[in-house]
């Protein structure tokens, strides 16, 4: 059992160390520490503009969205929004198709000053890709978190793209959650240092 835990920790550390951040043009700008800095700045800038941070994701990524939306709002004092009510999801899936369960509310409720955080381990989930497109149509800034294949479509759709080069759901999801938890913990420090990006 000790050997299993040691191997698991090594693989998780590798996934964190290998994480890559790119901009909308595909240019690399750093690793996990840069990811935390950039996402923190964008989230605080969005909040200062009066916008909301909208989270979208499926399955384990949805759990990350729910958890971080609460943490960012309660601990970080950043306005957040999620679209996970049972009635809402089933209504939209029934009426528009599951691929539009996020694009419809993002399109109807989203504003230009908002920030979309789109999470998908595979980077291929149709409803996440459509959700990003809806945000783009409004003019929102977008941050993506993905994994698996390096050429997954989500990885090229954001202003900031965080990619975890692992084919294991568990490691990809853990690194995504670590980054977003670290962002929540960084809000107070960044505010105190007046390091908020307003544009």
Image: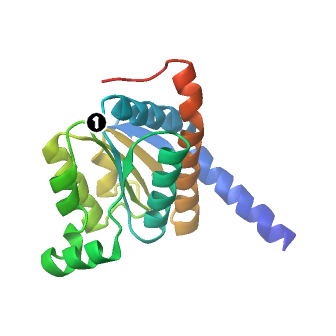
Q: Position of residue 31 (x, y in %)?
A: 53, 38
Say which of 59 and 11 sits in front. 59
Q: Residue at x 34, y 34 (%)?
A: 46
Q: Position of residue 196 (x, y in %)?
A: 44, 23
Query: Is 54 situated above or below 183?
Result: below
Q: Residue at x 44, y 30 (%)?
A: 41
Q: Is residue 99 left or right of residue 186?
A: left
For the residue labelled by badge 1, is the local secondary structure a helix, a strand or a loop?
A: loop
> Which quadrant would the C terminus be assigned to in this image?
top left
Q: Residue at x 50, y 65 (%)?
A: 167
> Which quadrant would the N terminus be assigned to in this image?
bottom right
Query: Is 122 situated above or below 95?
Result: above
Whether residue 133 is visible to the viewer of this picture, yes or no, is no
Q: Position of residue 35 (x, y in %)?
A: 49, 38
Q: Is residue 100 left or right of residue 35?
A: left
Q: Which residue is mark 1?
A: 25
């Amino acid at each position: 059992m000790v050997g299993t835990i040691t191997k698991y920790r090594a693989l998780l550390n590798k996934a964190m160390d290998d994480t890559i951040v790119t901009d909308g043009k595909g240019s690399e700008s750093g690793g996990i520490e840069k990811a935390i800095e950039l996402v923190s700045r964008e989230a605080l800038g969005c909040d200062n503009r009066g916008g909301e941070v909208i989270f979208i994701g499926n399955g384990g990524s949805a759990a990350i969205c729910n958890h971080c939306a609460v943490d960012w709002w309660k601990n970080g004092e950043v306005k957040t929004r999620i679209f996970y009510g049972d009635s809402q999801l089933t209504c939209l899936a029934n009426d528009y198709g599951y691929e539009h369960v996020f694009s419809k509310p993002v399109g109807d409720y989203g504003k230009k000053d908002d920030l979309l955080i789109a999470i998908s381990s595979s980077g291929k989930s149709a409803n996440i890709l459509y959700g990003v497109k809806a945000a783009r149509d409004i003019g929102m800034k977008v941050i993506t978190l993905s994994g698996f294949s390096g050429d997954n479509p989500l990885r090229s759709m954001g202003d900031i793209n965080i990619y975890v080069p692992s084919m294991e759901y568990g490691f990809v999801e853990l690194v995504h959650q670590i980054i977003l938890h670290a962002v929540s913990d960084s809000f107070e420090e960044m505010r105190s240092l007046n390091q908020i990006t307003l544009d």
